[in-house]
Image: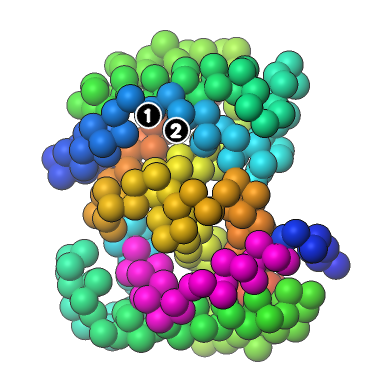
Amino acid sequence: MVLSAADKSNVKTVFGKIGGHADEYGAEALERMFITYPQTKTYFPHFDLGKGSAQVKGHGKKVAGALVEAANHIDDLAGALSKLSDLHAQKLRVDPVNFKLLGQCFLVVVAAHNPSVLTPEVHASLDKFLCAVGTVLTAKYR
Amino acid sequence: MVHWTAEEKQLITGVWGRVNVEECGAEALARLLIVYPWTQRFFDNFGNLSSPTAIIGNPKVRAHGKKVLTSFGEAVKNLDNLKGTYSKLSELHCEKLHVDPENFRLLGDILVVVLAAHFGKDFTPACQATWQKLVGLVAHALARKYH
């Protein structure tokens, strides 16, 4: 799967629109993921996952930051996410199926807050981008 | 045996009551064909699917989207008997239409995104969880008779 020039442009548009709300969106995506796919909570036994959790907010900020960074270096996702890729392979070892689940929740958050930016074409591009990020993060697993 | 809480049933019927089945169905199917273009393989006789614009404007896509989502309405009316409700359709999708059940999951995810775009903040996390559960169960019921 390759990100076309149009995809890259669409992704940058989305993150431009999201702007300073990225951290919030990250937290909300995680919240939605924990509620919708409870098995994902197994990766966070050390977290308070209750509503409004500061840990979830903090983690959402990290996740959003990584997505923003990836979007800003969209021509070299492998490079931009290399350290995170190592981390996921060596330490975190989150099963690859879960990146799709978080991706779906991030899409839902963007849709709920910015329906007008999520045209079908942009939806496609963002979905591809999130997929590509997941692929990079699991690339060194074996 | 599927179990629905009273809250889940409320979240389903509450949302469904506010859905324009024709519009939402058309949008969901169009997005499926755009976001996951390989799903176009089932619609060779639909005419022009060459671009997002063509897909969105395609009358066969709209009509089929409406048909699909209308059928989804049966699930909403029969939450306690999804297996029975989709038994014949499951056979049809296997024996005649030859649709990989993964496509039902893809459409379900798309539908959830469309609902989120439509309902905004009202599409709360609890609402999303309930609807993801529903679309997953519908996909499962549709795959049940495969052989």
Kindly check if marks 2 and 1 are in contact, taking CB atoms under 8 A apart as contact. Answer: yes
Q: Find the residue positioned furthest to the left.
A: A5
Q: Find the residue positioned furthest to the right.
A: B1
Task: Say which residue label 1 marks.
Answer: A21
Task: Say which residue label 2 marks.
Answer: A25
Q: Main secondary structure of the magenta part?
A: helix
Query: Tag on residue A40?
Result: none
Bin the neighbour count of mark 2 within 10 Å (Cα to Cα): few under 14, some 14-19, many 20 and up: many
Residue visible at 26% across and 36% down in the picture: A17
> A84 or B117: nearer the eye?
B117
Residue A76 relative to residue A43: left or right: left
Q: Is residue A93 above or below residue A7?
A: above
What distance separates the C-alpha of mark 2 from that of mark 1? 6 Å
Q: Position of residue A115 (x, y in %)?
A: 34, 52
Q: Which residues are magenta?
A: B9-31
Q: Amino acid at mark 1?
A: His
Residue visible at 28% across and 58% down in the picture: A120
Residue B33 relative to residue A74: left or right: right
Whether residue B30 is in magenta: the answer is yes
Quadrant where the image shows the C terminus of chain B: bottom right
Q: Amino acid at mark 2?
A: Tyr
Q: Position of residue B23 (x, y in %)?
A: 37, 76
Residue A81 falls in image quadrant: top left
Quadrant where the image shows the N terminus of chain B: bottom right
> A9 or B118: nearer the eye?
B118
Q: Secondary structure at mark 1?
A: helix
Q: Chain of mark 2?
A: A
Q: Secondary structure at mark 2?
A: helix
Q: Is residue B102 above or below residue A113?
A: below
